Amino acid sequence: MVLRVGCAFFLLAVVMSGCVRGPLAWQRFTLNQPISERDVAFIVDGTTRLPEVLDRLGSPDDIQSVGRWIIARYHFSDGRYFRADYGWGLRFVIPYSSPDLVMGGGGFGTDIFQVTCDAQWVVQDHAFAWHANSSEFRLWPFGEDQQQ
């Protein structure tokens, strides 16, 4: 019976963590509409014109003229944050002086889709530039790179 009440209380605390600061927090922030490979599959280098790209993807964030080339860039950003408070449960045992034992981390990265056109506005090249794993969640926060 005590185990059931304890499990029910723990589940209630985790569910209510969005209403009251709880032991775990996941947050995500996205700026601009992300562009995927499916969204740009219609682009054929040497054939597709920039106005067609603008019709499908909207206006770019940045347009530059470099020599005889026109470069249009679409920026979209993604940020993630995870936080765990290991001292959160102590507030029920020591209500007036419970410690905060918080471990958290996250990151924010910007991805870019770039379209390069010639002087006649015909797409000559297009590519994505993905940010490094700066907005990836990491279960184990210690160490530089766990993937190698």
Image (cartoon, rainbow, N blue to C red):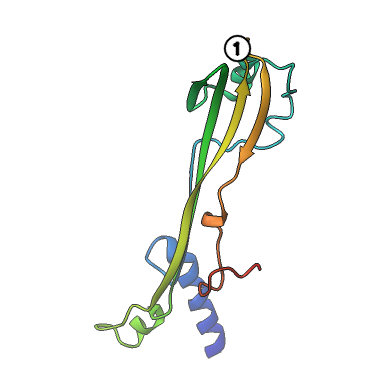
Residue at the farthest front position: 67
Q: Residue 141, position in %: x, y?
A: 51, 72
Tell me the crowding category of disc 1: few under 14, some 14 to 19, or many 20 or more residues within 10 angstroms, Cα based: few
Which of 3 and 25 lies nearest the eye of the viewer? 25
Q: Residue 132, position in %: x, y?
A: 56, 53
- Answer yes or no: is residue 28 visible: no
Residue at the farthest left position: 96
- Answer yes or no: is residue 50 visible: yes
Q: Quadrant of the N terminus?
A: bottom right
In this figure, which residue is indicated by the disc labeled 1? 119
- Seen in the picture, residue 97 relative to 38 is either above or below; the reply is below
Amino acid identity at mark 1: Ala
- Seen in the picture, residue 79 relative to 61 is either above or below; the reply is below
Q: Quadrant of the C terminus?
A: bottom right
Residue at the farthest top position: 120
- Seen in the picture, residue 131 relative to 23 is either above or below; the reply is above
Task: Kindly indicate the quadrant of the structure image that contains residue 103.
Answer: bottom left
Q: Residue 67, position in %: x, y?
A: 53, 19
- As drawn, is 35 to the left or to the right of 142? right
Q: Residue at x 58, y 68 (%)?
A: 145
Q: Residue at x 52, y 25 (%)?
A: 60
Q: Residue at x 63, y 9 (%)?
A: 120
Which of 48 and 93 lies nearest the eye of the viewer? 48
Q: Residue at x 59, y 45 (%)?
A: 130
Tag 1 secondary structure: loop
- As drawn, is 87 to the left or to the right of 34? left
Question: How many labels sit on residues?
Answer: 1
